[in-house]
Image (cartoon, coloured by chain):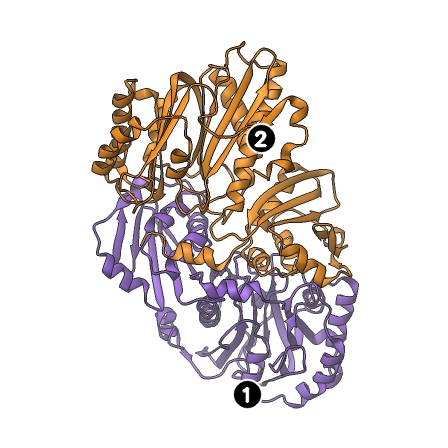
Chain colours: A orange, B purple
Amino acid sequence: MHLFTTIWEGGSRLGIQAISGSVTSPRGFRAAGVSCGIKDRKRDLALICSKVPATAAAVYTANQFKAAPLWLTQRHLADGKAQAIVCNSGYANACTGERGREDALRMAQLIAQELNIAVEMVVVASTGVIGRYLPMRRIEKGIPELASLLGDNDNGAAEAILTTDTITKKVAVEVELSDATVRIGGIAKGSGMICPNMATMLAFLTTDARIGSGLLQRLLRDSVDKSFNMVTIDGDTSTNDMVVILANGLSGGVEINEGANDRESFAAALDLVTGELAKMIAKDGEGATKLVTISIEGARSFPEAKQVAFAIANSNLVKTALFGQDPNWGRIAAAVGTSGVEVKEEKLSISIGDLMVCKNGVGADFSMREARRLLSAPEVEITINLNQGRQRAQVYTCDLSYDYVKINAKYTT
Amino acid sequence: MHLFTTIWEGGSRLGIQAISGSVTSPRGFRAAGVSCGIKDRKRDLALICSKVPATAAAVYTANQFKAAPLWLTQRHLADGKAQAIVCNSGYANACTGERGREDALRMAQLIAQELNIAVEMVVVASTGVIGRYLPMRRIEKGIPELASLLGDNDNGAAEAILTTDTITKKVAVEVELSDATVRIGGIAKGSGMICPNMATMLAFLTTDARIGSGLLQRLLRDSVDKSFNMVTIDGDTSTNDMVVILANGLSGGVEINEGANDRESFAAALDLVTGELAKMIAKDGEGATKLVTISIEGARSFPEAKQVAFAIANSNLVKTALFGQDPNWGRIAAAVGTSGVEVKEEKLSISIGDLMVCKNGVGADFSMREARRLLSAPEVEITINLNQGRQRAQVYTCDLSYDYVKINAKYTT
């Protein structure tokens, strides 16, 4: 929650404040998580549902091999309506062909039956190992218990969607609109396979705002582009990931419309939620020992700034140096030089926090000791000024540690 | 040398055979390597020179921040002539501005003086940490000793160009041309920062063939595209790397010309040398425990095949699974799906060696034990058939181990 401070500026001006909880904080939402035996002794099945039908929007992975649950969810959300989200961890139900699609549909049917809603009102998500079939018997046995545990406590659901994550990721905010107080909450899972173009992770958001699905979809897409799409752990892009939001309208008040003042406040509140979840994901990257913010300044355009930022953030050589607290700025310069963006070497400057380590393309006269001190902090900011324009971009990532290798060398076993 | 078998097919048909040695195997070349104190107790300064002026060709890094020695070498090779190559390891002389360029020129001047040749006949190379000035006093002191040690033994030079490499990389072949027996030899360094578009490493090649610099340049470019440009260790691209070849004509015989039969034989011999050096680099990737060949088959075009191959070879998730001997083929499928090449999931097949683990986009019925056995070998072949065309590409890489992180977390310190 302490990360809030960094993006909080301006939030209070718009009447937004952090509140406790996550997906069950907005009115009319309940959640639960159980252990049904997909994973050993860990929660692996989550359910979130709204008391009433909600408008819904979603953004999906950029990977062209979309997992079966995404295939199903895209169909169920075609009408912009949903009421429940079910998610299992452990197996991704990706690269599972026709049987995988049947399994995803079966999950939706079982939930629909328990909640007495139409099957098309159910969003299905999965995360875990690719290429294995879901243990459907266990899931079938787990679903009645899952439904029976639905309540105000969001912890079970927040836990059950995790894979190699080490902490649950939860955020909730409240925003004053013209005639209603609206809440937005969210949970997410991240860790490995985190890279731009959405892809990358699961986030389930709920809100009691009254809003149409068209506007909700536009706001979600914009918000994802500013948050989850600016995070990279290892440059890999998963087959499974999506961000879904349900808006059930139980806050009352008039509907939020394009052009209304409330639109700006609601969008800002949504950005706070997605921004916080995105940073939590970067900070909890597999094996990460620090959250690293790569800021590009002085670019000719935002796409160029973003491209340079990702070239640095995805460089294994940069990421291992960050793990080693090694102020080896030459690796950052090399990543800039190979980013594909035309840059003048003699204009480049690089800073760690406020300490300039490279100026006009050559090493600055800096204290190695101070550089190491800055790099040993849990949050590190690297700023690269290209000095050839006025555009900027900021990307969140983490370091590459022994533990990343350890976690990923043995993930399926 | 055992790697030779794999690309040897067809070589003997063209009258090519492996011989011992490397850069001093062709007639009229000498070499030496000394420790001048740039690195601790290790050889760090190499020299290769021809008895007579040679035609020369080179391919340089794709990184736009080219190091000072590359800047100088490009100028010195403008006339297609050179006689000596000097190379230091330890510092890259990259991101060093005007002073870096002066230092590179000074290295060339000192060598020219020792060898009594024109300064423009000297090729300069550096490899190591970026952003630090060269310790010129040590280099100045070392050069006379270096020149005095010039001889037939290539080991000193092969050692002195290494950084985090664990083995020297040397190859030499002999090829029968219509009226002469020509030799080609080469040494290389690789390890980290190895990725496509040349970049990536140093290779110094010598030959006693008679060949013009225009044809030599075209053959070198083609050969590099098929070898060094098909290797990736970590997706990073260095500021410093180049492949240089000197051809001194001392084999006698008529000049190799475009269109002549000898051209094909010479090109094949050159490809053997660069191909072997490239594989040695992949096998000796930082922290690598195995050489991994990624073969794409059934692609619509070679560029698409190559793009998919690199997407897999650069995936940290795939590389850590390979380190863990984990037959987690879903990560390979996910990398294919996000490669940017349009692929039909239901047509995809993946094999480890001869063992098919994924067929028609879903898991095949395979023995986990056999898959693990295949993955535990020092050389692993992964074949991905896209089943949508007839083109293919093969990329060499290695796994991502604890030692990669260890080596790179502490490289400058």
What type is the residue that disc 2 sits on?
Leu
The alpha-carbon separation of the residues under discs 2 and 1 comes to 66 Å
The residue under label 1 is B153
Q: Chain for mark 2?
A: A
Q: Position of residue B144 (x, y in %)?
A: 71, 87
Secondary structure of the residue carrying tag 2 is helix
| Residue found at x 50% / y 20% | A216
The C terminus of chain B, quarter of image? bottom right
Residue A240 position (above or below residue B278): above
What type is the residue that disc 1 sits on?
Asn
Q: Position of residue B47 (x, y in %)?
A: 63, 81
The N terminus of chain B, quarter of image? bottom left
Instruction: Tell me whether circle 2 and circle 1 mark residues in contact (CB < 8 Å).
Output: no
User: Is the residue marked by circle 2 packed among few (<14), some (14-19), or many (20+) residues within 10 Å?
Assistant: many
Secondary structure of the residue carrying tag 1 is loop
Residue A21 circle label: none
